[in-house]
Amino acid sequence: MTGRIDKKVAVVTGGCSGIGLATVQRFAQEGAEVVIGDLDEVNGPGIAQEVGATFVRCDVTTKDDVDALFRKAFDTFGSVDIAFNNAGISPPDDQSILDTDLEAWQRVQDVNLTSVYLCCKAALPYMLEQGHGSIINTASFVAVMGAATSQISYSASKGGVLSMSRELGVQFARQGVRVNALCPGPVNTPLLRELFAKDPELAERRLIHVPVGRFAEPVEMANAVLFLASDESSFITANTFMVDGGISGAYVTPL
């Protein structure tokens, strides 16, 4: 244990799989008290026990659940130092605007964008009271550039996360609270594997746009989140933190 966030209290939503799980593991390795907010009551308690974290069942689209999650962190450990607002979905019925119906649009907005609003709103009072804190919101590379394969509500929601993160980072900078947006490229998560297992052509179309020639591993995103959570990034706020394998810097012609 190197203790880069030793004794800090970290809340992670969507912490039972993918980037969230990898971050929970990294945070625990680095000495944090971790509180996992997730709907997965089957795997959540076991994950928490394995890494020495606290599991709280949380529907991130519900204000009462989100408020209870952050209250649990504060009541148990006495502070809220880090909030990694990461929960999100990318369902198959979110496609071109011509094919995505209103229900699918709203569901993605609720989980991907409204949840981040609720989590920031819940975390900020604790952080402002103590005079410090780091909020990391999961956006995406599609928040800054067009996607090769359209997911209209997902892209719009991540654009909203990025814009909100910038505004909050500016607003609360002089009160000791940093807010940054993590913008991953495609990551080798269960969500991505399930999507691409059904459509290998779609996977290849995504991969051709990644200059490093592969998808990211969740731990690579977790390392970026750890940096933003730690004091090593103390002069970074309102930032678009691209971890995309070079996608945003490349020029390619879509297939």
Image (spheres, rainbow, N blue to C red):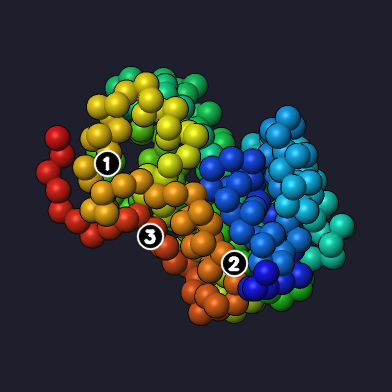
> In the image, which is nearer the foreground, mark 1 or mark 2?
1
Q: Residue at x 27, y 41 (%)?
A: 207
**Few, some or many residues within 10 Å of mark 3 (<14, 14–19, 20+):** some
**Left or right: where does residue 14 sit relative to residue 247?**
right
Residue labelled with disc 3 = 242
Give the residue type at disc 2. Answer: Ala
Q: Tell which of 9 and 113 is nearer to you.
A: 9
Q: Is residue 144 above or below residue 189?
A: below
Spot occupied by residue 173 in the image (x, y as percentages of width and height): 57, 75
Q: Image quadrant for the N terminus? A: bottom right
State the mark number for residue 229: 2
Left/right placement of residue 249 relative to residue 19 reads left
250 to 148, vertically: above or below: below
Relative depth, front residue between 224 and 105: 224
Residue at image position (65%, 73%) is 2
Q: Earlier in the sequence, mark 1 or mark 2?
A: 1
Q: How far apart are the two marked residues, 2 and 3, measured between alpha carbons? A: 15 Å
Q: Is residue 182 above or below residue 1?
A: above
Instruction: Give the percent coordinates (x, y) of residue 180.
Output: 51, 63
Give amino acid for label 3: Met
Residue that label 1 marks: 207
* Furthest-left residue in this view: 253
Could you tell me if residue 107 is visible in this image? yes
Above or below: residue 128 compared with residue 47: below
* Label 3 vs label 1, nearer the camera: 1
Circles 3 and 1, Cβ within 8 Å, touching? The answer is no
Name the foreground residue: 132 vs 247.
247
